[in-house]
Image (tube, coloured by chain):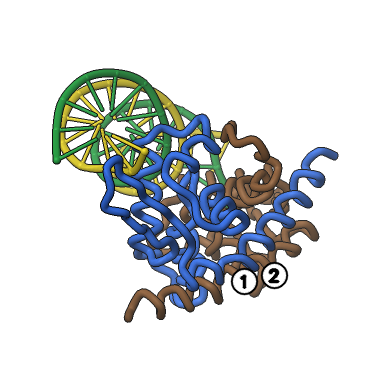
Chain colours: A brown, B blue, C yellow, D green
DNA sequence: CGGGATCCCTTACGATACTG
DNA sequence: CAGTATCGTAAGGGATCCCG
């Protein structure tokens, strides 16, 4: 993304982070995998009743492409696919936790 | 935003944070105001050569609505308007810093 | 100088149907 | 079971012109 400021460098990191976790369902998916470990596709789907299959696949693919999620396919009939965070994915924990707590403070702030 | 998981509560904070700083130019604007203090509209515009006036106004209005930025109008001819972070806006500092450093680690990670 | 109003385009998001 | 393919919609972002 071209931002055009003299010292893009400062915010390039934030932009990169946003591009990775900015998707509508991504924080939720990451949180689930972070706290519940390995999950099958169908399990994730059941935990996210409002997501469509297409979107779940899409978001998981992007998270995989970005190296945060590992996809493991078992060659069986019926198919079985498991998802879990990579080591790199787990390093997001403090960031997510920070954003989470600030967000709650913000919600409180806006209520007044 | 309705997400539909059983325990939305956990990620509501992150979603709230994303809604506040998720705009394309917002992290950049926040960073500038955070590190350079008060800025006039025209100054911000010059520091962001690629943004249009419309978008700058739009993003600043949303940041103001969300209580992060204070807008101060001087009743003069020609008009003069200054923007700066509110006390609440400044509390974003650690979050932005965290996201920034993780983003850089991520960029390094993806390079290999 | 610092906007507002309008129109347009791309992208993210989503519903539905079908498949190895 | 875990997807793909296709199509449609809504929102974010942007260009341009006008105004107090």
Numbered disc 1: secondary structure = helix
Are circles 2 and 1 on residues that touch, CB within 8 Å?
yes
Please provide percent x and percent y for residue A87: 80, 60
Residue B47 falls in which quadrant of the image? top right
In the drawing, does residue C11 fall left or right of residue B77?
A: right
Give the numbered dot on residue A63: none
Find disc 1 in the rendering and name its residue. Answer: A98
Please provide percent x and percent y for residue A3: 57, 35
Query: How busy is the neighbourhood of tag 2: few (under 14 within 10 Å), some, or many (20 plus)?
Result: some
In the drawing, does residue C3 fall left or right of residue A104?
A: left
Query: How busy is the neighbourhood of tag 1: few (under 14 within 10 Å), some, or many (20 plus)?
Result: many
In the drawing, does residue B69 fall left or right of residue A20?
A: left
Find disc 2 in the rendering and name its residue. Answer: A94
Give the quadrant of the C terminus of chain A. bottom left
Residue A81 falls in which quadrant of the image? bottom right
Please provide percent x and percent y for residue C18: 39, 33
Residue A46 visible within the image: no
**Residue shown at the point (46%, 64%) measured from the top left:** B15
**Residue shown at the point (31%, 55%) measured from the top left:** B73
Give the quadrant of the N terminus of chain A. top right
Closer to the camera in the image, A37 or B50: B50
């Amino acid at each position: 993304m071209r931002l055009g400021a003299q010292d893009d460098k400062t915010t390039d990191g934030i932009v990169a982070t946003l591009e990775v976790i900015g998707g509508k369902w991504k924080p939720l998916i990451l949180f689930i995998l972070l706290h519940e470990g390995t999950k099958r596709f169908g399990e994730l789907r059941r935990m996210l009743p409002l997501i469509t299959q297409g979107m779940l696949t899409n978001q998981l693919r992007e998270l995989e492409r970005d190296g945060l999620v590992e996809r493991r396919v078992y060659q069986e009939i019926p198919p079985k696919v498991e998802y879990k965070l990579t080591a790199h994915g787990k390093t997001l924990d403090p960031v997510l936790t920070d954003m989470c707590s600030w967000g709650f403070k913000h919600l409180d702030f806006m209520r007044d």
